[in-house]
Amino acid sequence: MAAAASSALHAVGAVASAKPRSAAPAVARRRSVRVAAAAKGGPGSSGRGRLVTRSAVAAKADEAAAAAGSKSGGHELLMFEALREALIEEMNLDPTVCVMGEDVGHYGGSYKVTKGLAEMFGDLRVLDTPIAENSFTGMGVGAAMKGLRPVVEGMNMGFLLLAYNQISNNCGMLHYTSGGQFKIPIVIRGPGGVGRQLGAEHSQRLESYFQSIPGLQMVACSTPYNAKGLMKAAIRSENPVVLFEHVLLYNLKEKIPDEEYICCLEEAEMVRPGEHVTILTYSRMRYHVMQAAKTLVNKGYDPEVIDIRSLKPFDLHTIGNSIKKTHRVLIVEECMRTGGIGASLRSAIIDNFWDYLDAPIMCLSSQDVPTPYAATLEDATVVQPAQIVAAVEQICQ
C-alpha cells in the first residue's frame, strides 16, 4: 500500500516546483536531498532530481552562536508557532517536503502547528487524510521511498499505535531490508504526554514503545528554540525521525534567532552547569527539574541539569563528561518506569561510566498505571518537583 500510494503523491514535488514560491532567506544551505526537477518537464523527471547539498545536523558551535544571537535580537514565538515556522521555511526551501495527517490542512491541525500551510502550499503538499493512521503513515513511507520528505502528524501520539507496523517494519527496517536501495527520510510528529485531564488514552508517553525499533531516531523538544531546530534537522535527515512534542508545552514562549539555525539530532543540551549531581531529563520534566533546582540551590546544592533531547541514540559524550565531574546521577522522566527511557539510560550509564559513580543511579518515572482523569490523581502519577528535591538530598548524603 505504501509504495502504491506514493506514485500519486510524488506529483507533490512537481506541482510545488511549478508554482511560484516565496523566496527562501539568503543563507548558505547545506544538505543532501533529492529535489524534484519535474517543473522542467523532462521525461522521467518525477524520479530523478537535482542534488542540492545541505547538512542534516548543525555543529555545536553554530547552535551556540545562534542561541547567543537570540538574546540580542530575534523574535518571540510560542512553541507551536516555532514548529510551524520550521515547516514553512523547509517547505519554501525544498519542494519535496510535504505534510499529511488528520485535519492538518484547512483546519490547521489540532494544535495549529500547520495553520495556514494549505493556503500557502496547496492541498497536495498539505494533505488532509481520513482517520486511518495505518494508511496515511504507510502512504508517507511510500512517498519517502520515492524521494519526497513527508512530515506525518499524529493528532495524538497514542493514535500512532495504529500505525506501529508501518513505523516498525517499514520506517525502521526498509533501508536495511532493501539492501540500501531505499532511504526513508520521513518525520513522524505529534502531541503526547500527560495533559490536563485528557484521560488515559490521550495521555500516553510512547517513547518506550518506539525506542527498540532498529533504524529509527527519536528526539523530544522542550523549548521553542529547540523545537524549531530539531524539526528542521529531522526534515533534512536521511533517517526516519520521531519528534515527540508535549501537549502542555505548545504555548511556551521564547525569543528565537531571526537567522536560520538547526539543532543536532544526536546532541544533549546543557541547561544548568553544576558540581554536585547530574540530573538527566527531557520534555516537560525539564521544567519540573528547573523548579526543583531553585529549591536545591537555596539548600546549598549545585545540580547540573541536562536536557538529553536525543532519546535514541543517547548523547553519551555530554552525559559522560557530566558524570565524570559530579559522580552522581538522577534521571527524571514522564515515561513509565518499566521499560522506559530512564531504564535504558540507566543501563547505558552503568555499562559506560560505572567506575565514575559514587552513588547508585536514581530514576524518577511515572507510575505504571493508566493516567487517571481526576486532576489530583493525575498529578500523583507524574514526578513532582518536591520528589526531585528529596531524591537529590538522598543521593548527596
Image (spheres, rainbow, N blue to C red):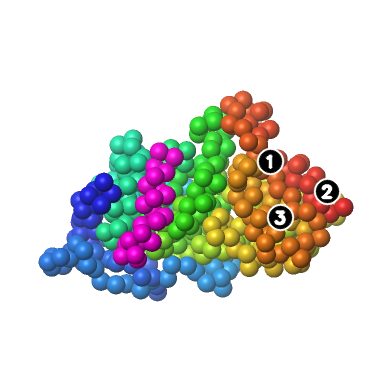
The span shown in magenta is 161-182
Q: Give the residue number, with chain letter if any, for mark 1.
A: 383
Q: Residues within 10 Å of mark 1 (few under 14, many from 20)?
A: many
Q: Give the residue number, with chain letter if any, for mark 3.
A: 279
| Label 1 close to label 3 by CB (< 8 Å) | no
From this view, report whether residue 303 is shown above or below residue 31. Answer: above
Q: Answer with left or right where residue 357 lies relative to residue 92.
A: right
95 vs 140, nearest the viewer: 140
Name the residue rendered at 26%, 46% in the picture.
Answer: 1
> Residue 370, image x and y in percent?
58, 31
> Residue 357, image x and y in percent?
77, 61
For the residue labelled by badge 1, is the local secondary structure a helix, a strand or a loop?
A: loop
289 vs 215, nearest the viewer: 215
Q: Mark 1 or 3 closer to N-term?
A: 3
Q: Mark 3 or 2 closer to N-term?
A: 3
Q: Give the residue number, with chain letter if any, for mark 2.
A: 394
Q: Mark 1 or 2 closer to N-term?
A: 1
Identity, as a three-letter code, of the amino acid under mark 3: Ile
